[in-house]
Amino acid sequence: MPDYKEMYLTLFRATEQAINALIDAQQKCEELYINAPQENLIFLSPDQESEEK
C-alpha cells in the first residue's frame, strides 16, 4: 500500500520550498527597485497618450 503520509509530506515540503523561493525573489526585486537610481518621471494624462500615438 502506498505511503500516503510520506507522499503528502514530500509534496508539502516541495510546495513550501517553491513558495519561499518566490518570496526571496520578490524581496530581491524590491531591494533592486528601492536601490535603483531615481529617474525623472513624466506623467501623461490619458489625453496626451492618445495624441502621441
Image: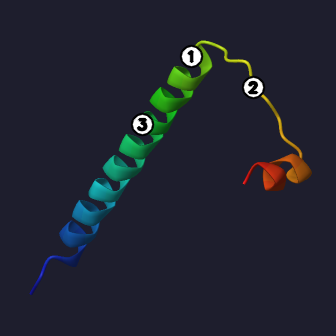
Q: CA distance from mark 1 to mark 3?
A: 16 Å
Residue 29 x/y as whole percent? 49, 31
Residue at image mark 1: 36
Upstream in sequence: badge 1 or badge 3:
3
Residue 51 x/y as whole percent? 83, 52
- The answer to whether the residues at label 2 and label 1 have Cβ atoms under 8 Å apart is no
- Residue 41, numbered label: 2
- The answer to whether the residues at label 1 and label 3 have Cβ atoms under 8 Å apart is no
Q: CA distance from mark 2 to mark 3?
A: 26 Å
Residue 12 x/y as whole percent? 33, 61
Report whether 1 appears left or right of 42.
left
Is residue 53 or residue 45 the one in the foreground?
Answer: 53
Report whether 26 appears left or right of 8.
right
- How many C-alpha atoms fall within 10 Å of the one at disc 3: few (<14), some, or many (≥20)? few
Q: What amino acid is at disc 2? A: Leu
Count of numbered tags: 3
- How many C-alpha atoms fall within 10 Å of the one at disc 1: few (<14), some, or many (≥20)? few
